[in-house]
Amino acid sequence: MSKSPEEITTLVGREVYSNNGVFVGEIEDVRLNLDQQAVTGLALGQLNRELFSETVQLGTGVIVPYRWVRAVGDVVLINDIIERLKQPEESEEVVV
């Protein structure tokens, strides 16, 4: 018996973590390219406030490009690039 392909709606509700194990958010919807019949992004809500407090207003979500996805299982793993949002910018010295 062959396993049938999963419906993309099964992604909704799954938690998203970075490769380093940091919680990013929960999938609320998917962005599709109908011409290519491919998922192009994941719309996340229930965001990790530590990661997004500086860049996203409370109560809003973000769309993560699907190319960042590394693994899909009980949870979705994405590149750790998302954690760079939280890191303080390198000190920039102004040269006069």
Image (tube, rainbow, N blue to C red):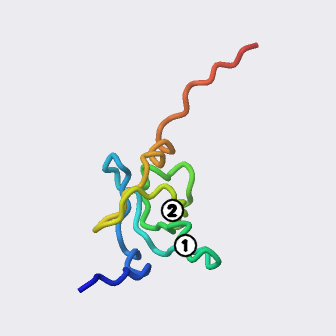
Q: Describe the element under mark 1 as helix, strand or loop.
A: strand
Residue lying farthest front? 1
Q: Are marks 1 and 2 in contact (CB under 8 Å)?
A: yes
Rendered residue at 55%/28% (across/down)? 90
Rendered residue at 43%/55% (across/down)? 49
Rendered residue at 54%/66% (across/down)? 41
Callout 2 amino acid: Tyr
Callout 1 amino acid: Ala
Position of residue 62 measured from the top left corner of the image (x, y, whole percent): 54, 62
* Residue wearing tag 1: 38
In front: 45, or 79?
A: 79
> Dot 1, how many residues are within 10 Å of its Cα: few (below 14), some (14-19), or many (20+)?
few
Q: Describe the element under mark 2 as helix, strand or loop.
A: helix
Residue 55, relative to residue 46: is it above or below? above
Residue lying farthest bottom? 1
Residue 30, relative to residue 52: is it above or below? below
* Left or right: residue 14 compared with residue 86: left
Where on the picture, by quarter, is residue 17? bottom left
Position of residue 73 measured from the top left corner of the image (x, y, whole percent): 30, 67
Image quarter of the C terminus: top right
* Left or right: residue 30 compared with residue 14: right
* Residue wearing tag 2: 66
Query: Marks 1 and 2, Cα distance to the nearest angstrom?
Result: 10 Å
Residue 64, relative to residue 35: is it above or below? above
Image quarter of the N terminus: bottom left
